[in-house]
């Protein structure tokens, strides 16, 4: 059911219905009318008319700039209030709300009774609304915008399809002005000429139902079991917890989700509540996997759980979930090759603690020392490096900080010929490069100050204006003994009088 709001929220409504009140927006460098009072519509004013033209015709016009934030707040409060009718309610900005009232109309007699009750409540709240009923969201929306509550859908204009302006204009020029004119045409011809118009028409006529997504948050997943008499063994509580995991798995399967965090609370009869918590690197809903993690966590406790006078209640909560599609469990079942590693990481995290294991998470930086960070295995990275078919060869082991080396080179900006590291000289037999990496010019990083302090002998040379550091030229070199190194020249001649050389990494 569709109830588009016709009340602009930028200011209080007019005191009487005779005042010419319009609401304006700046569109394409012109102030235009976007919402009108009934009196303004009766005078012949239309949306998209410029405010100057409207004032020339009606000098007494009251123009108010629209407050879209206030309108969005009003719409959110209306959608929240629609929970009295159905939990399946969602907003359709800027001025609409959609309700799925399947099976919810019996307290009001029928759908028309529910619509009358809703219209009365909106009117009492100062909201002018138009309602529409339909078998699909598109049908209800079209009746609310262009027809009556249950008007003839075939008599609606083609604008009810809500296609783009060019498509609507082309339909009218072809003489197709109503939905009835389109319904009798072959859908294949409409699809070939107007793209998704045939799909829009099918949804409007009720041939395809596209469900709405409610804005009301789903209730948290939990399972609870109480005992008539307290149970005195931890193993009995774990057996109950396994049954609760099975119940939670059913709820997760219904939502096509998997748990990332599971919390078990064992309520003792004396008021103490021992707590067990496990986390997983990937969403799971298999009770056996989660139960094994709980047992690993229980065995790793330095202070075992004391049942005391017994447990009279066991509660399982799943506070963190992620989407997880159903998987095939028979015939040619294909197992994810990364699943054994993920289960091993979860077991180690349950036994050693989630902060005892780290993984490298890529970051949005092209500087080698800032390109990754260590994070717990269950924490997703905020940014993923795009797949590069030919990434530059870089060592897995980096020195922190890079080691200063003495380099001998043939040309000032040429490759290294010989370098000394830790008192040992290395003759360069082969080299590749340079791979030039510029500084992050958009921000002055702390790394730039660190490089200043390291280059104490060149401290009097300023950085380029607006730069966050110096340019680096990286070389992959191999000495006469076959050892491979990653060296870079820090700074160009235009940036620095005497560039320094550093060893940043070692190849295997």
Image (spheres, grey):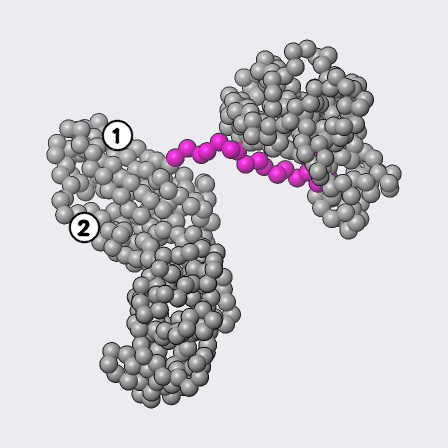
Q: Which residue is mark 2?
A: 300
Give yes or no for residue 217 being in the magenta stretch: yes
Magenta residues? 200-220
Residue 149 position in % (x across, y down):
69, 22
With respect to residue 334, does 60 lie above or below? above
Q: Do the CB atoms of the residues marked 1 and 2 lie less than 8 Å apart?
A: no
Q: Which residue is mark 1?
A: 226
Give the quadrant of residue 360.
Answer: bottom left
Give the quadrant of residue 507.
Answer: bottom left
Of 365 and 267, which appears nearest the observer? 365
Of 156 and 286, which appears nearest the observer? 156
Look at 20% across and 37% down and name the residue there. Answer: 274
Q: Residues within 10 Å of mark 1 (few under 14, many from 20)?
A: few
209 relative to 270 in the view: left or right: right
Which of the two discs, 1 and 2, sits closer to the camera? 2
With respect to residue 340, does 414 lie above or below? below
Rounded to the nearest angstrom, the CA distance separating label 1 from label 2 is: 27 Å
Q: Does the rendering let one see residue 225?
A: yes
Look at 20% across and 30% down and name the residue there. Answer: 312
Say whether disc 1 or disc 2 marks the residue closer to the N-terminus: 1
């Amino acid at each position: 059911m569709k109830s588009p709001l016709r009340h602009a929220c930028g200011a209080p409504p007019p005191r009487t219905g005779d005042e010419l009140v319009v609401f304006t927006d700046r569109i394409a460098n012109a102030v235009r009318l976007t919402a009108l009072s009934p009196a303004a519509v009766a005078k012949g004013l239309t949306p998209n008319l410029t405010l100057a033209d409207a004032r020339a015709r009606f000098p007494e016009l009251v123009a108010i700039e629209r407050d879209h934030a206030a309108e969005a707040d009003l719409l959110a409060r209306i959608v929240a209030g629609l929970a009295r009718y159905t939990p399946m309610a969602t907003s359709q900005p800027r001025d609409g709300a959609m309700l799925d009232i399947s099976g919810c109309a019996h307290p009001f007699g029928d759908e028309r009774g529910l619509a009358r009750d809703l219209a009365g409540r909106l009117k009492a709240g100062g909201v002018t609304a138009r309602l529409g009923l339909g078998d699909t969201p598109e049908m209800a929306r079209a009746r609310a915008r262009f027809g009556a509550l249950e008007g003839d859908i075939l008599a609606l204009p083609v604008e009810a399809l809500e296609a783009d302006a060019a498509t609507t204009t082309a339909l009218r020029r072809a003489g197709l002005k109503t939905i009835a004119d389109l319904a009798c045409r072959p859908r294949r011809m409409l699809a070939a000429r107007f793209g998704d118009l045939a799909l829009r028409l099918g949804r409007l006529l009720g041939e395809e139902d596209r469900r709405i997504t409610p804005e009301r948050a789903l209730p948290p997943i939990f399972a609870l079991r109480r005992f008539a008499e307290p149970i005195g063994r931890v193993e009995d509580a774990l057996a109950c917890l396994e049954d609760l995991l099975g119940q939670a798995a059913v709820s997760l399967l219904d939502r096509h989700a998997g748990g990332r965090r599971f919390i078990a609370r064992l309520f003792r009869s004396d008021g103490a509540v021992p707590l067990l918590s496990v986390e997983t690197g990937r969403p799971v809903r298999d009770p056996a996997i989660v139960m094994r993690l709980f047992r690993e966590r229980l065995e790793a406790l330095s202070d075992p759980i004391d049942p005391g006078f017994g447990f009279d209640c066991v509660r399982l909560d799943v506070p963190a979930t992620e989407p997880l599609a159903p998987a095939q469990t028979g015939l040619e079942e294909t197992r994810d090759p990364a699943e054994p590693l993920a289960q091993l990481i979860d077991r180690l995290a349950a036994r050693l603690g989630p902060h005892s294991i780290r993984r490298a998470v890529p970051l949005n930086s092209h500087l080698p020392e800032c390109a990754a960070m260590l994070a717990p295995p269950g924490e997703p990275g905020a940014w993923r490096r795009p797949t590069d078919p030919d990434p530059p060869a870089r060592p897995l082991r980096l020195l922190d900080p890079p080691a200063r080396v003495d380099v001998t080179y043939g040309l000032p900006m040429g490759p290294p010929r010989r370098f000394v590291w830790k008192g040992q000289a290395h003759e360069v037999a082969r080299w590749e490069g340079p791979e030039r990496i510029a500084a992050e010019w958009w921000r002055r990083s702390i790394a730039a100050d660190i490089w200043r302090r390291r280059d104490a002998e060149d401290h009097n040379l300023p950085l380029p204006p607006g730069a966050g550091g110096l340019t680096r030229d990286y070389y992959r070199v191999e000495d006469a003994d076959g050892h491979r190194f990653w060296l870079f020249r820090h700074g160009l001649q235009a940036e620095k009088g005497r560039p320094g050389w550093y060893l940043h990494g070692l190849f295997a």
